[in-house]
Each structure stands twice: as structure tokens, then as C-alpha cells.
Image: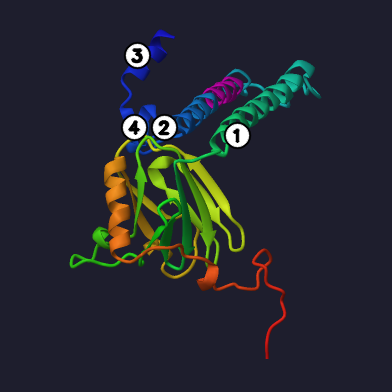
Amino acid sequence: MGAVTVILAGCTQAQLIGFLPEDSVGATNHTDRITGLWVTSWIVLLAVGIVTWVLIIWAAVVYRRRKGQTGFPVQLRYNMPIEIFYTIVPLILVIGFFAFTVRDQTEIEQPIADPDVQIEVYGQRWSWAFNYAHEDVYEVGIQAQEGESGQVDTDQLPVLYLPVDETVEIKIESRDVIHSFWIVDFLYKKDMIPARSNYMYFTPLKEGEYDGKCAELCGEYHSRMLFTVKVVSREEYDEQMALLREKGQTGQLDSTYDLNQNLPGTGATGEGEN
């Protein structure tokens, strides 16, 4: 225990959180829970790995063929205690990982009855559109563009605004193919499936800018399907909503521009007109 304490005391912040993004610490009400599950799992797996390596090396050294020995050693059919051990321990590990994962997933996926902010996100090749339901405004972005240096011009990326310390519900939709809505530092992503609505629920806890991207290969310009998330104060959030109204971006975008109008769940009858 003393050796373990000394070793852990020398860990960097990146190592302590399992090399997850450092900005993820405390980013939402869920990120620390996710980090805890991730790090604890790796500690358990590392302990299992060490025990396994020690047993392999011990068996190879102790039962190696000595000089002058010939033939085969005494053959044993099985060892009942060891067979039981090798069956029970993995079973306990699997049940443990499953139980803790279900516990955390249930908490993360728990719907918010009356969220402070409701946003509908449309994924479309190869950009994003955001409906701010309570404010009745919207924003439409374009795919990432190259700047003069050949790098992505981050100033032209679509921006999703979120107020800090307020509960958020995000409804996730796709206009064409399967995408995946991923705010990297929030340590969670959700698939965007045509004709199906998915949801995310969380509370952002730290103001700042966070990278977002599509995490599902969706075509030629998948790598440019980027966006930025800005977690701001309520005052700044209201100012941004007012700017969208001034631009005339009022109302809500709907499924009119979806490419797959005849998918199940869209209300289509499958009967076309001549």
C-alpha cells in the first residue's frame, strides 16, 4: 500500500483521470461520474493483468524443464479449486462492470422533467442546425472551412450556446444518414438516426468553449462536420438569443428539409404521386 501511495502521488492530472481530456473535469454534472467509472475499471483490469502475468511467469519458471530431465512431467487432468477460481472470478468481474455501468448509465440517461433549456439539434451532411425551443429561434451552420493557413477556420464553425448551471435537454435528429452528436469534453455522445429522436440530459457546470464533432463516419466530408459549444452566463446566453432574433432567425426548423421523407416514423404512407 505504501508503494502504491508513492506511485500515485507522482501521477499527473492527465494520468489521474485516465488520459481523458483535462477540461472534462467538472464540465457537466455527469463527467466526474464517467471519469470515475473509467479510471476504476482500468485499475481493476490492471490488477487482474498483474496477477495473470505473475502466474504465467511463476509457472514458466517453477515448472520449466531442468537440465537432464527427459520425457513429460506427470499429466494432471484438472485441478478443481483452480477451475472454480478461474470461473468465479471472471464472472464476478463481469457482473461488477455491468452493475456499475448500468448504475451510471441510468443516472446519465434520467430525463429532466422540466429543463431550463430545450434545444433540438439537426445533423446534416456535413454541418449542424440548432433550434432553441424556449426562445423560439434557430441557428444553421456550414461545414468547416479552411483558413489561409490551410487549417480549419474555427470562427466559421456553427456555435451551440448553453447557459451555465442550468438543466439542458437536447433532442437529437438526423436529416439524412446516421451521425453522432459528440461534445468531446462532456465525455458523452449520442447517435443521430433518421426518423428517430434521441435525447441527452445534463447540466453544464463550467463556462468555456468546447469542441464538438460528428463521431460516426457519414460520408466524404465527415471530418469537417465540426461545431463549437460555448457555455456562458445566463446574461450572455440571452444576448445571443436576442442577436438571432435581430437576424430574423425566429421560429423553429422542422423536418421539411429531411432527405428521407418516406422512412418509418415520418408519417409517410409510401404512396407516391404521379
What residue type is disc 3 on? Val
- Decide: marks 3, 4 in contact (CB < 8 A)? no
Mark toward the viewer: 1 or 2? 1
- Residue identified by numbered label 3: 6
| Cα–Cα span, label 1 and label 2 | 22 Å
- Asked if 212 appears above or below 17 in the picture, the reply is below
- Residue identified by numbered label 2: 18
| Cα–Cα span, label 3 and label 4 | 17 Å
User: Disc 2 or 3, which lies upstream in sequence?
Assistant: 3
Check disc 2 and report its element: helix, strand or loop: loop
Q: Is residue 90 left or right of residue 115?
A: right
Query: Which disc number belongs to residue 10?
Result: none
Closer to the camera, 75 or 134? 134
What x and y, as percent, mark residue 186?
A: 42, 41
Query: Which disc number belongs to residue 106?
Result: 1
What residue type is disc 1 on? Thr
Q: Which residues are magenta?
A: 47-59
Closer to the camera, 8 or 100? 100
